[in-house]
Image: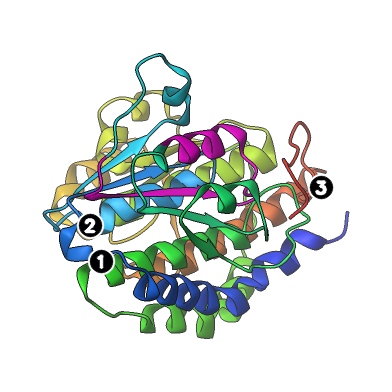
């Protein structure tokens, strides 16, 4: 099986990350929303888009403004969530046509004008449900597993963080775009046995990235991969990890809090894998995500799976 569309789409992230950031930042700057008056940030999403919404919560950890992530299913209950004018509601959907996300944003827009749609499809249902529209313009993503659109969403989320906090670290997106080609070349040197990878681990702001990497591997390989907080993994899932399993870690492994995990990994003779990007800087997290997307796609080919169209998956729309 030859390399196909998904590899081109991963590489295209270098061209779309910065425009996605700038479009999001400019849209919010030109809006009539005053970030100083916002007391709550609410996010609504599904699937890979949840990576971006959780990422926002993680990078705003030290900010006094509260964040909450609402499950779109809540909006089908008799008792629906409440909204106020002093909150922002951000809904994400790559296609812009995820029905339950659109339904939730329509409901929220009845109570606050601070609703924002982030999507990759012009004139989508999600965009018409929001007062403010952030179009990612990541281009058509024909492969079923989302790759470049996830990175575009993360770039937009970083722009929201910077607008909200009055900071500017757009250079982290620039570093990502400048180093993506080298990152993918390094990823091409890695050959994984999908049946040996057990978990993708991280801490702090890298946790949602780890979950997304695990989701992508699960989608491409058809094998369940655990993804999330490394310290939670230590208190449970590691018990069913065998000596033949591989673990992947994202971010800074030198943190003192991770010493018990490293000791347990050594004790069980587990192989711990890392991308060359080992800090929790935004640029390193995005490069790690693209790196493991590429590794996952290559490894899928090795087991006879078409990474652009893995068995059992389908897209809502062709965007």
Q: Considering the numbered disc 3 on the image, is that residue within a helix, a strand or a loop? A: loop
Q: Which residue is mark 3?
A: 306
Q: Which residue is mark 2?
A: 60
Range shown magenta: 84-107
Report the side of 98 relative to 207 (left or right): right
Q: Considering the numbered disc 1 on the image, is that residue within a helix, a strand or a loop? A: helix
Q: CA distance from mark 2 to mark 1?
A: 9 Å
Question: The C terminus is located in which quarter?
Answer: bottom right
Report the side of 230 relative to 145 (left or right): left
In the rendered structure, does residue 86 fall within the stretch colored magenta?
A: yes
Q: Considering the numbered disc 2 on the image, is that residue within a helix, a strand or a loop? A: loop
Give how far across and how far down residue 56 sits, in percent: 33, 55
Which mark sits nearer the N-terminus, 3 or 1? Answer: 1
In the rendered structure, does residue 290 fall within the stretch colored magenta?
A: no
Q: Which residue is mark 1?
A: 164
Q: Which of the two discs, 3 and 2, sits closer to the camera?
A: 2
Work out whether residue 300 or residue 109 is closer to the camera in this orientation and state it: 109
Q: CA distance from mark 3 to mark 1?
A: 41 Å
Work out whether residue 94 or residue 268 is closer to the camera in this orientation and state it: 94
């Amino acid at each position: 099986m030859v390399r196909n569309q998904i590899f081109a789409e991963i590489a295209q992230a270098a061209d779309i990350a910065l425009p996605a950031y700038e479009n999001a930042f400019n849209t919010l700057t030109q809006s009539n929303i005053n970030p100083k008056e916002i007391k709550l940030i609410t996010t609504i999403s599904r699937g890979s888009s949840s990576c971006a919404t959780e990422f926002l919560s993680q990078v705003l950890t030290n900010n006094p403004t509260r964040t909450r992530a609402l499950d779109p299913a809540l909006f089908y209950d008799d008792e629906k969530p409440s909204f106020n004018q002093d909150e922002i509601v951000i809904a994400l959907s790559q296609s812009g046509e995820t029905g339950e996300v659109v339904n939730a944003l329509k409901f929220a827009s009845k109570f606050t004008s601070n609703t924002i749609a982030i999507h990759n499809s012009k004139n989508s249902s999600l965009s018409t449900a929001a007062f403010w529209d952030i179009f990612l313009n990541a281009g058509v993503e024909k492969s079923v597993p989302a790759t470049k659109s996830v990175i575009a969403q993360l770039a937009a989320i970083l722009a929201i963080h910077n607008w909200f906090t009055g900071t500017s670290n757009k250079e982290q997106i620039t570093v990502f775009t400048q180093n993506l080609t080298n990152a993918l070349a390094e990823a091409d040197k890695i050959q994984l046995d999908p049946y040996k990878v057990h978990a993708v681990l991280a801490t702090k702001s890298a946790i949602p990235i780890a979950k997304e990497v695990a989701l992508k591997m699960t989608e491409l390989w058809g094998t369940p991969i655990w993804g999330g907080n490394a310290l939670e993994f230590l208190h449970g899932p590691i018990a069913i990890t065998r000596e033949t399993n591989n673990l992947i870690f994202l971010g800074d492994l030198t943190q003192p809090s991770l010493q018990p995990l490293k000791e347990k990994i050594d004790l069980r003779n587990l192989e711990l894998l890392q991308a060359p990007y080992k800090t929790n800087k935004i640029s390193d997290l995005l490069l790690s995500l693209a790196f493991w997307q590429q590794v996952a796609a290559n490894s899928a080919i090795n087991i006879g799976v078409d990474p652009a169209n893995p068995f059992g998956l389908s897209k809502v729309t062709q965007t």
